[in-house]
């Protein structure tokens, strides 16, 4: 019968190639892990007393004579283990995390592999030797099986010759890198209760584990059973270590995610802790080890990656580990509390919507060492969202009660009061943030007007990108291969002129949009988008109401005869009434014959502008001027000075500022 024929060479060629030193050492670590598992299998709970693993590594900068030997006193290649060794993707050690691909990584990394093992069979101790070769069909060469005088079983594998497929480039050339990565990789095994004696020789240096770990770990605390709804039962071990524990890692403090006694991912938490080093000598770092069946089940075949998104790791750190880490590092983190508190106070002053409690309450919702302002805001926003969702549930509950057929006058009044209270609690913070923004806009424009008027030498401050972004109801978009076009802005601040403009949408201009687009590409007059043109807006709910706004450059005193703003506005009104114009989306502008036009001109009332409007009526405060035509169109034209514009806007909003506790002092004042 015909069957599929495996191609081991291509299978190994497709294995992931190393991207860093840790990946390059993975085949060696697989051999060490196999040795540890073998001793654990033979000696069980007595492995710490009887198990032995010896690792010998030679390396140099040129990487031409790299070699490694791993030897253990486990069961050796007995019948069961030999059958598993010659079978790819075996499940022999599935309960220990074995995926059956470790020795395939050996072939991918090394060109010369020799195996020597003694084991017990029915007639006594036997010795098996062979060369393990990357070949399409004959992977076991020079195989020999014979009696041996060795007193106990053992397994020894010797590696030589790095392959030039990424392993040679990424393999460490210095012995201390081998120690550093080995220490980090097997940290959970070294601190556990089932670790054999592991002697590691790298060049002329020798270290014995797990004793060597005690020299760098100062304090350890373990949370044995952390029950979580999403991740099941987890175990967290936290340690204060000498900073050498992080010497070859990109960062200082880490949470190591472990699957089947092997480090799969190490996540730096430097940003969350806000510490470089800590301790009396300022030389300690934090390391934590997280283990559990959830991690064991979701590791890839090579045990180098987890089969879920990185966001899951972040969630495990934030939701599971962090409360315990905060308590473990309570002392070192205490000094950061004051700095964090100041940042929270600053953020909530600018964004009151996240100020859902006093500073102490807010600080409880932020990780102890977090000092990045955007991250602090993110934590507070998430908490605010959760609270607002609870408020929304309250409101929905009230509405459900109102639909009850048995509702009475008293219950109706109570329900309305409850709903109002819930809405107020949920929305007042957003309103406060909106009010603060209005105050900032007014303060900023006041400064900008000063700059425009004071600097008459060039147009540095008249290239009004900033002013345009605040009050102009349009924006310029670049079209690939076609230059630019003018479109309505998503938002604007024309409430400064009149509150009726706050929610009005931009729909027209007295200049063709193609001309505005062309002008926008000029470096000489980018301010053409805002000044000296009439801009049309209207509100959907009032189709018979049109609002026109024209801005004149602050400080301008000289005008040509054809620039009379009254005539300019009137000409544009006539064009709108004619029905021959199109809006920003190219649709015909159809206005009702009873359309009312509310027109505003914002300018300094000096020079020719003062003369042209001298006979207009004065506004109630005597500062502005207003013109109401007897014929031609229904509505009015109001002339507002720039200073009066700001003053009126402040007066209209002062009650809100007072309610929000905002003083009259400018946010940009240096005093």
Image: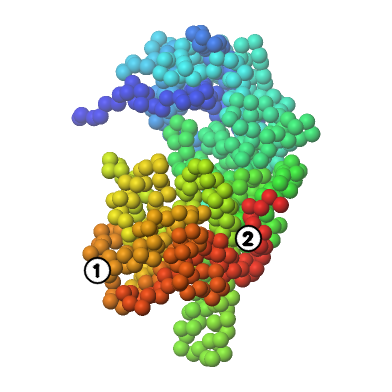
Q: Quadrant of residue 380?
A: bottom right
Farthest residue to the left: give it: 1
* Marks 1/2: CA–CA distance: 53 Å
Q: Where is mark 2, residue-wise?
A: 355
Q: Secondary structure at mark 1?
A: helix
Is residue 161 in sight in this rendering?
A: yes
Q: Measuring 68% from the left and 50% from the top, which residue is drawn there?
A: 670
Horizontally, residue 385 falls left or right of residue 632, namely right
Q: Measuring 57% from the left and 27% from the top, which residue is drawn there?
A: 36
Is 331 situated above or below 111? below
Query: Which sits in the foreground, 104 or 16?
Result: 16
Q: Measuring 55% from the left and 29% from the top, which residue is drawn there?
A: 37
Q: Secondary structure at mark 2?
A: loop
> Residue 635 got which mark?
none
Horizontally, residue 542 falls left or right of residue 334, namely left
Q: Where is mark 1, residue-wise?
A: 578
Q: Measuring 49% from the left and 8% from the top, which residue is drawn there?
A: 64
């Amino acid at each position: 019968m015909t069957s599929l024929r495996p191609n081991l060479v291509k299978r190994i060629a497709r294995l992931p190639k190393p991207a860093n030193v840790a990946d390059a050492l993975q085949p060696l670590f697989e051999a060490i892990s196999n040795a540890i598992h073998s001793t654990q299998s033979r000696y069980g709970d007595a492995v710490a007393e009887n198990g032995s693993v010896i690792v010998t590594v030679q390396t140099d900068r040129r990487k031409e004579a790299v070699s490694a030997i791993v030897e253990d006193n486990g069961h050796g290649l007995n019948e069961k283990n030999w059958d598993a060794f010659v079978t790819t993707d075996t499940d022999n050690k599935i309960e220990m995390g074995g995926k059956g691909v470790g020795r395939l990584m050996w072939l991918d990394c090394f060109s010369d592999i020799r195996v020597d093992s003694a084991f017990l069979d029915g007639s006594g101790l036997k010795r098996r030797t062979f060369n393990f070769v990357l070949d399409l069909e004959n992977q076991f060469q020079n195989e020999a099986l014979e009696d041996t005088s060795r007193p106990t079983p053992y397994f020894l594998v010797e590696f030589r010759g790095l392959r030039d497929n990424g392993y040679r480039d990424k393999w460490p050339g210095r012995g201390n890198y081998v120690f550093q990565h080995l220490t980090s990789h097997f940290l959970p095994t070294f601190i556990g209760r089932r670790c054999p004696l592991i002697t590691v020789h790298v060049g002329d240096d020798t270290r014995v584990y797990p004793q060597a770990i005690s020299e760098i770990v100062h304090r350890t605390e373990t949370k044995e059973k952390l029950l979580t709804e999403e991740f099941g039962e987890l175990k967290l071990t936290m340690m204060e270590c000498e900073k050498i524990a992080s010497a070859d890692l990109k960062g200082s403090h880490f949470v190591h995610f472990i699957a089947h006694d092997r480090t799969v991912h190490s996540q730096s938490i430097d940003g969350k802790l806000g510490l470089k080093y800590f301790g009396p000598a300022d030389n300690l770092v934090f390391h934590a080890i997280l283990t559990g069946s959830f991690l064991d089940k979701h590791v890839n075949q090579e045990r180098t990656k987890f089969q879920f998104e990185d966001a899951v790791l972040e969630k495990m750190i934030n939701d599971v580990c962090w409360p315990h880490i905060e308590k473990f590092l309570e002392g070192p983190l205490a000094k950061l509390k004051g700095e964090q508190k100041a940042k929270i106070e600053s953020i909530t002053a600018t964004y009151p919507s996240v100020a859902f409690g006093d500073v102490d309450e807010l600080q409880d919702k932020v990780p102890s060492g977090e000092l990045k302002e955007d991250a602090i805001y993110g934590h507070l926003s998430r908490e605010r969202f959760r609270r607002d969702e609870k408020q929304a549930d309250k409101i929905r509950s009230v509405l459900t009660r109102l639909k009850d057929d048995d509702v009475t006058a008293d219950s109706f009044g109570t329900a309305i009061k409850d709903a109002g209270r819930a809405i107020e609690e949920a929305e007042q913070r957003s309103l406060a943030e909106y009010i603060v923004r209005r105050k900032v806009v007014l303060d900023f424009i006041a400064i900008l007007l000063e700059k425009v008027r004071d600097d008459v030498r060039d147009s540095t401050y008249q290239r009004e990108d900033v002013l345009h972004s605040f009050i102009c109801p349009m924006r310029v978009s670049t079209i690939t291969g076609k230059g630019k076009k003018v479109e309505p802005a998503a938002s604007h601040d024309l409430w400064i002129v009149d509150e009726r403009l706050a929610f009005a949408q931009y729909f027209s201009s007295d200049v063709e949009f193609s001309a505005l687009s062309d002008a926008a590409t000029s470096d000489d007059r980018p301010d053409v988008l805002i000044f000296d043109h009439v801009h049309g807006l209207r509100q959907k709910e009032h189709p018979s109401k049109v609002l026109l706004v024209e801005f004149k450059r602050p400080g301008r005193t000289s005008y040509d005869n054809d620039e009379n703003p009254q005539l300019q506005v009137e000409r544009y009104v006539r064009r709108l009434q004619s029905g021959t114009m199109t809006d920003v989306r190219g649709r015909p502008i159809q206005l009702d014959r009873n359309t009312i036009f509310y027109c505003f001109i914002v300018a300094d009332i000096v020079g020719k502008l003062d003369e042209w409007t001298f006979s207009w009526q004065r506004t109630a405060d005597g500062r502005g001027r207003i013109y109401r035509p007897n014929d031609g169109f229904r509505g009015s034209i109001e002339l507002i000075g720039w200073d009066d514009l700001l003053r009126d806007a402040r007066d209209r909003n002062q009650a809100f500022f007072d309610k929000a506790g905002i003083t009259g002092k400018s946010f940009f004042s240096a005093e």
